[in-house]
């Protein structure tokens, strides 16, 4: 029964073909290229192709009152993509170059320690 249904369905789908005419009246005529060669189709001089930008994330762990000796940092985007996850030195500043999509203006970070009494810190930083 299944095979019969599939055969009938395939016959119906093949009968639903599109227009086989070679009319190009639906295509825009304004700025269509005459060739598909890259050398014949130059990009404008002001065109930009960058989808990412490099920024620097800086953090001074001593600015936070965390008692624990081991600090752990998670840096991530609003979409949830993690940029960094690891242990950092409590006594020195932390700097991380990050590649961000052009539409991202901020990154979020979570800072926590190994001491049970410390509260985790969650912030958002504009870059």
Image (cartoon, rainbow, N blue to C red):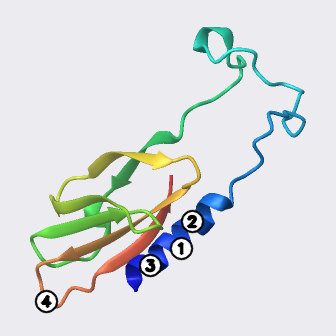
- The Cα–Cα distance between marks 3 and 1, rounded to whole angstroms, is 6 Å
Quarter placement of the N terminus: bottom left
Are the two marked residues, 4 and 3, in contact with CB atoms closer than 8 angstroms?
Answer: no
**At 66% across and 60% down in the image, what residue appears?**
15
Q: Secondary structure at mark 2?
A: helix
Disc sitting over residue 116 in the figure: 4
Circle nearer the viewer, 4 or 1: 1
Q: Is 28 left, or right, of 1 in this rendering?
A: right
**At 40% across and 68% down in the image, what residue appears?**
80
Above/below status of 63 relative to 31:
below
**At 31% across and 47% down in the image, what residue appears?**
96
- The Cα–Cα distance between marks 2 and 1, rounded to whole angstroms, is 5 Å
Are the two marked residues, 2 and 1, in contact with CB atoms closer than 8 angstroms?
Answer: yes
Which tag, 4 or 2, sits closer to the chain's start? Answer: 2
Residue position for label 3: 4
Are the two marked residues, 2 and 3, in contact with CB atoms closer than 8 angstroms?
Answer: no
């Amino acid at each position: 029964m299944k095979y019969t249904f599939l055969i009938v369905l395939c016959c119906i789908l093949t009968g639903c073909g599109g227009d086989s005419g070679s009319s190009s009246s639906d295509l825009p005529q304004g700025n269509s290229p005459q060739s598909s060669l890259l050398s014949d189709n130059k990009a404008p001089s002001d065109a930009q192709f960058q989808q990412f930008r490099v920024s620097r994330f800086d953090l001074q762990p001593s600015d936070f009152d965390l008692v624990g000796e081991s600090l752990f940092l998670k840096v991530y985007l609003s979409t949830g993509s993690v940029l960094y996850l690891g242990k950092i030195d409590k006594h020195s500043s932390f700097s991380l170059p990050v590649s961000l999509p052009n539409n991202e203006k901020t990154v979020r970070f979570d800072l926590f320690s190994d001491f049970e009494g410390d509260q985790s810190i969650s912030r958002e930083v504009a870059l």
